[in-house]
Image (tube, rainbow, N blue to C red):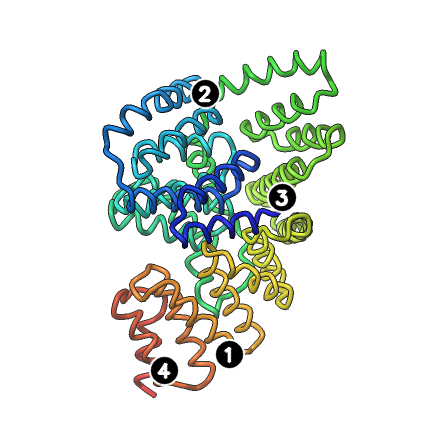
Amino acid sequence: MDVSKHVEKAEEAVRRKNFDYAISLYQQLLAIRPDEGRARAGLRQALNRRFEYKKSPKVLALLSGAFPLLLGNLYRALKKPIPAASNFERYLVLDPKNMKVNAKLGDCLTAAGFDQSALAVYENLAEIAPQDVEALKSAGLLCYRAREMDKALEYYERALKISPRDQEANKMRKNLAAEGALEKGGFETAKSSLELVKDKDQARKLETEGRIFQSEEDVSQALDALETELAANPTDAKLLMKRSDLLKKSERFEEAVASCEKALELAPSADLRDKLGDLRLALLDRRIEDAREAGMVTELPRLKREKLEFEVEDLARRSQENPTDLAMRFRLGRAYFNSDRLDEAVGEFQAAVKDPRRKLDAYLMLGKCFYKKDLFDLAAKQLERALSEAGTTSPRAKEIQYNLGLIAEKRNDASTALDWFSRVYEVDINYRDVTTKIEALKAD
């Protein structure tokens, strides 16, 4: 199935206000590919738009939606996230802006491992309920897991504006700072950001807390039961993948990789290849962390290089297998950028701008690529497009405006640089070194 054409057909139906047809298309696609983020996001928007145009009485949702809501809650209590999510979706067809049910849907999709779909749900929830701190943190966490650090930071900062003392959001914001998300916004420091968070134990705790139904004891018991089943059915690929998933939850990555490799040999598929790639990246992350904790400083550069090389190779394979997956092309572009393969990165980001969810970030990354290539006019043009997408009051606007100021400095255009830096200063006097920049430009 050509996912991109299927989604475009549904998007066109929404534009023509043929909401029922669009919803049907999205539902068909999600039945086949439940973790298709663009489809999940599109379904949420189509349902919201139909609800706005044809508001149904609340009593209809209460009556017609009572049974799927009951089933959803039951399956969720039984730790069966996939059927739970399916039933919550059935309810949301009738009551699409119900915040509690949207939150339950997001939790179930996350527990099922459908991170792209879960992110689409939480992003929608953050839109319809902008004061929902938990939705903002959940969206930030999923962006963090997808290595979309700028978006993760934006969501955590939005959460902290609403709840400044939220410990979880504050800790994750510090973790993002440790990875360079706060610093790499400036082109003067634009470089590969491969440092892991300093508090990885906390990061892993936040990643799992409230998102996975099984406790450590549950996982251990499930593994014991699976080992018994595998002893009787050692070539059952599904059992091997269940074992791999449980081992991953226990952070036994080497064993999880081995189990996934065996499953892939028995039942080759693109989905298993992708899961194996994710597991190998997690294993490389663990090795980097272990080397740092052991003080093996000389080993760190080699391990980081090994991780980045594998990431490029794996993402290139995924993109080749599914060239219409624009989110994947964005991830590949970022990997190329971190590897200083700028021309290849530009090609991927130019494709990724067609994805409405990635357009802003793709323009921003194009600006960074052109800046590193000393093509300052092109860099400024891309950043101005990014600013148009973000809006001048967006949390991302500061980053974009600051970088436009840096470009103006490179062009020796002091007045334009001062103008851009002043815009940042006006809303955040403590942003990076903007105060020093302004003082220096005024002194000249």
Callout 4 secondary element: helix
Tell me the residue that label 3 is attached to. Answer: 1
- Marks 2/4: CA distance? 57 Å
**Residue in the foreground of this view, choosing between 430 and 160:** 160
Q: Position of residue 198 (x, y in %)?
A: 47, 45
Numbered badge on residue 376: 1
Q: Amino acid at mark 2?
A: Lys
Quadrant of the snapshot with the N terminus:
top right
Tell me the residue that label 2 is attached to. Answer: 79
Quadrant of the snapshot with the C terminus:
bottom left
In screen coordinates, is 247 left or right of 65? right
Callout 3 secondary element: loop
Q: Position of residue 64 (x, y in %)?
A: 32, 25
Q: Position of residue 417 (x, y in %)?
A: 37, 80
- Marks 1/2: CA distance? 53 Å
Q: Amino acid at mark 4?
A: Thr
Numbered badge on residue 416: 4
Q: Residues within 10 Å of mark 3 (few under 14, many from 20)?
A: few
Residue 196 in view of the camera: yes
* Total numbered badges shown on the rendered structure: 4
Residue drawn at (29%, 63%), measured in percent from left and top? 393
In screen coordinates, is 418 left or right of 412? left
Tell me if residue 158 comes above or below residue 215 in the rendering: below
Q: Earlier in the sequence, mark 1 or mark 4?
A: 1
Callout 1 secondary element: helix
Q: Earlier in the sequence, mark 4 or mark 3?
A: 3
Q: Are marks 1 and 3 in contact (CB under 8 Å)?
A: no
